[in-house]
Structures are given as structure tokens and as C-alpha cells.
Amino acid sequence: MIRKMKETDCAELCSIWLSANLEAHSFVPAEYWLGSLEAVRRALPQAEVYVCERGGQLAGFIGLNSCYIEGLFVRSGMRSRGVGAALLEHAKQRKSYLTLYVYQKNRRAVRFYERSGFEKRSFGKEE
């Protein structure tokens, strides 16, 4: 089931956010993610966020800022089970188009978005 985030989801979503970033971005110092956690905790209740529940548990979430995907995060152990695809499809149904930024070194995410129909448009530095 996909639904809008409730304020009571915030702590668990922050945990998913931190864990997913630490696992997916080993090339970024962990201190960066740890240092950003409080800002994420404050921003989540103000953002357009949809969560996916599986078996009564929060499996992942997607955050949107207009047509920009701020992030899509899936709980460890729930990845490669359709959670990310379901969240992305939910966002596609609500927006006329979507854009995002993905670290090039996050190959798994790059492949996911390419399979989902996204095209590479520009490149930043090798992160």
C-alpha cells in the first residue's frame, strides 16, 4: 500500500534514509549523512512524501519537490522486491514529468532509473 506520509512515520523514515544512504554511498563520508540527519528530520514533515507499507512495515519512501525526486529510499532487506518501482510509478501518476540527480558511482540506482525510463541528461563530477 502506498500512502502519504504521516508525521508519526518520521523517525522510521529517517532511519531508512540514513541506512540507505550509508549503504548506497560508501564513496561519501558517513559524517556527511550523519550530519544531514537532523535537517532531513525537520524537512520530512514539510515535504511531499509517499510511503510504501508491506506487511505492516514501512518498506520505503519517495520525496518530491514539485516534479523533482528529492530521494527514493528502500529499507534494507526490502530492496529488489518492487518497492522502489511501486513508489516511482506512484510519483509518475501524479506528475507530468520527473527529474532527479543520481551519483554516477551509485550504479545500482543508475540502472534502476534507466530501466524505469529515465535518460541521462547531464553529468557532474565523478561522485
Image: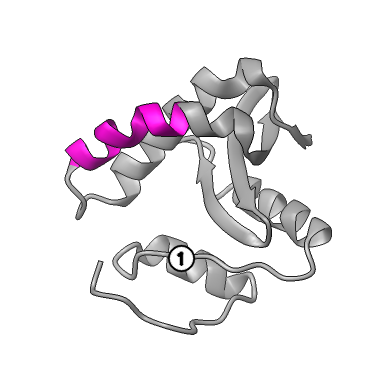
Kindly identify the residue that appears in the image at 31 percent across and 43 percent down: 23
- Which quadrant of the view contains residue 106? bottom left
Q: Residue at x 53, y 65 (%)?
A: 100
For the C terminus, which image quadrant?
bottom left
Q: Is residue 93 magenta?
A: no
Instruction: List the residue tagged with mark 1.
Output: 101
Which contiguous range is marked in magenta? Answer: 30-41
Type of amino acid at the residue the image marks with label 1: Tyr
Q: What is the tally of numbered marks visible in this picture?
A: 1
**Image position of 15 (left or right of 35):** right
Instruction: Judge left or right: residue 85 versus residue 40.
Output: right
Q: Is residue 28 left or right of residue 81?
A: left
Q: Main secondary structure of the magenta part?
A: helix
For residue 122, what is the image quadrant? bottom left
Magenta span has 34?
A: yes
**Which quadrant is home to the N terminus?**
top right
Name which residue lies at 54% across and 49% down. 72
Residue at image point 23% right, 41% down: 32
Residue 20: x %, y % from top left: 40, 40
Badge 1 marks a residue whose secondary structure is: loop
User: Dot 1, how many residues are within 10 Å of its Cα: few (below 14), some (14-19), or many (20+)?
Assistant: some
Q: Position of residue 42 (x, y in %)?
A: 48, 27
Report if residue 79 is visible in the image: no
Between 125 and 72, the residue placed more toward the observer is: 125
